[in-house]
Amino acid sequence: MSDANVYAVKTLTSKEYFAPGHRACSGCGQAVAVRMVQKALGRNIVMASATGCMEVVSSPFPQSSWEVPWIHVAFENAAAVASGIEAGLKAQRRKGKIDGRKITVVAMAGDGGTADIGLQALSGALERGHDFLYVCYDNEAYMNTGVQRSSATPFGAVTTTSPAGRVNSGQLTWKKNMMRITAAHDIPYAATASPSHPLDLVEKVKKGMETEGPAYLHVLSPCPPGWGIAAEDSIQLARLAVETGIFPLYEIDKGKHRITMNLEKLVPVKQYLKKQGRFRRLSPEMMEEIQERVCKEWQELREKAEQIDPSAGADEALSKEQEGETEAAKIFRVKAGAPV
Amino acid sequence: MITLTINGKKYEAQKGQNLLQAAIDNGIEIPHLCYHEKLPPYGGCRLCQVEVTKGEKVELTTSCTYPVSQGIQVETETPRVQKARRLVMELILTMAPDSPEIQQMARKLGIETIPGGFPSSGEKGDDCIKCGLCVRACEELVGPGSITFSSKGPERKVVPPFEEEPESCIGCGTCVHVCPTGCISMEDLGRKRKLERWKRVLSMKVCNDCSSAYIPKAQVDYYLKRTGDPYLAEWFDLCPDCR
């Protein structure tokens, strides 16, 4: 379903739980995503937030942007603290110290706090089956400390610790697939979301909240200084990441894959990469390599989704209609102004 | 500010607010299906019933249509309230036995079975609970008013006028997002957007640059008509990526 709706966003609540006046950079994709996530979560929540950009910009003493109970925890243990809160609430409820209303426990961390430093705490919490929602805001490097590489940094991206030189043009390893790692824990709900598709994001947060047991949400958050993009382009970049298939929007609901943003054709990755300063030194061969991998992963994802969901097969019928086209035209939808 | 007591605790509420919104703002759960904070209260689903004590009088009433006043005492979980809610929920469940959202809500209220079976036989039913959210959102939040209630009693249903394709529908998907049972679907198939339930098929506007279909033509026309700004037409010639 397309998200380009002028009017449907009116159904979102007008309350703000993430107050304005925080110190995020202009054009911060994460701040937009956090605001939307908070709107969906409402006020009956307790948050554990790992160290990272969002902690630094939202809570300079003595101010705070959080209008909900919020705990700042160390880099590695957002998931561990969240599981402690959940167990504590359960015990308090059993003793009759708090009423029976549902309180959602949320853990929030960046990609470093999820994929590198916090991975074992996350894995433990998922395995123990605590009833909580883990939201990972993925800006693809350690942006807070000045752009150091993390395991979520994509192939070819330049960071201060994966610099471009005469031989290499940035990160040499591929992005860690957190969705597959979390899904391998057999958790009831895992999904990817992007601030460029706000209604989709809100729906996924609500679904994750209502799920009994652990839920994982991976949100792409474009970072203007870290990615080398203009502040006004961050949401556009997030949308391009979805449309190129680099960051497909899908959910794994009790083991069933479902693509929530179905793409007729992919946009070539070149258009996404060329807009960013961090991919400036990418050679055409590396770009080709990235394109191949994205196509392969997109195909795999579609196969997984189609095995179970017959509605995803609608794409097949469409591509059959356009059989006169060349092989490449079947996969790509070329945008104007594309670099050649 | 008004002070009121909910379940023995004192809370504050804005003057003129309805009781349900005051409870939600204070983090108290009252189950509801037909209420939306952006729309005026409707009192259609009857699920949000609570017991209100005002002076000597104790009454069972829907909290969404009850304006808050100074010193009222509200109980949200008494046996009388629970019994009333369960009855309402059973009736709602017979209308939408297949909806996972409604099933979950029913289980929360302690309903495990209904006459005719629950979970249902798997036959695809209507799933509409006649809460009127889609009708009101279309009319009051967006404006075209493309759908309406028709018939009375057990025949009552939400349909486009004369059950024909509604020409005024702009395919914005607001009804899809407010529906509490998820019984309205919207699909983008190539250059067409289809709303199965309203029998509406819209052709999409194509971006002049990249020829991707991104918004229904009817929605653009409606937006231009409402804003009255002719320069915006150019804005919609390009999709959000190419602007």
Image (cartoon, rainbow, N blue to C red):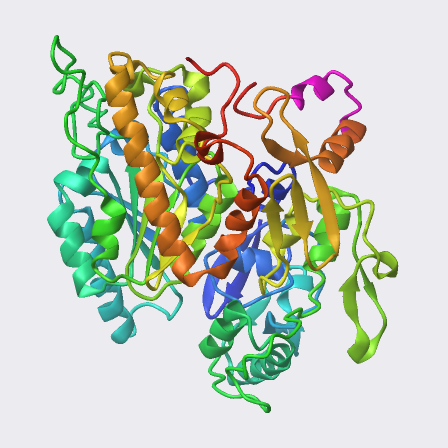
Q: Could you tell whether A167 is left or right of A103 in the image?
A: left
- The verdict on residue B235 being magenta is yes
At x 21% / y 63%, what residue is drawn? A88
Give residue A241's position: percent from left, percent from top: 39, 31
Residue B220 image-quadrant placement: top right
Q: How many marks?
A: 0
Look at the image and tell me whether residue A1 can be seen.
no
Vertical comparison of B229 with B164: above or below: above
Kindly indicate the quadrant of the structure image that contains residue B84.
bottom right
Picture coordinates of residue A85 (x, y %)? 22, 58
Q: Where is residue A111 in the image (x, y as percent from the top left)?
A: 23, 37
Q: Of all residues shown, which one is farthest toward the bottom?
A: B115
Q: Is residue A38 left or right of residue B216?
A: left
Q: Nearer the viewer, residue B1 or B218?
A: B218
Residue at the (59%, 52%) spot, across then down:
B177
Q: Can residue A245 be seen in this view?
A: yes
Q: Is residue A89 magenta?
A: no
Please provide the residue range marked out in magenta. B227-237
A161 versus B106 height, above or below: above
Q: In this view, does B95 lie above or below B63?
A: below
Q: Determine whether, in the image, residue A191 is placed left or right of residue A183.
A: right
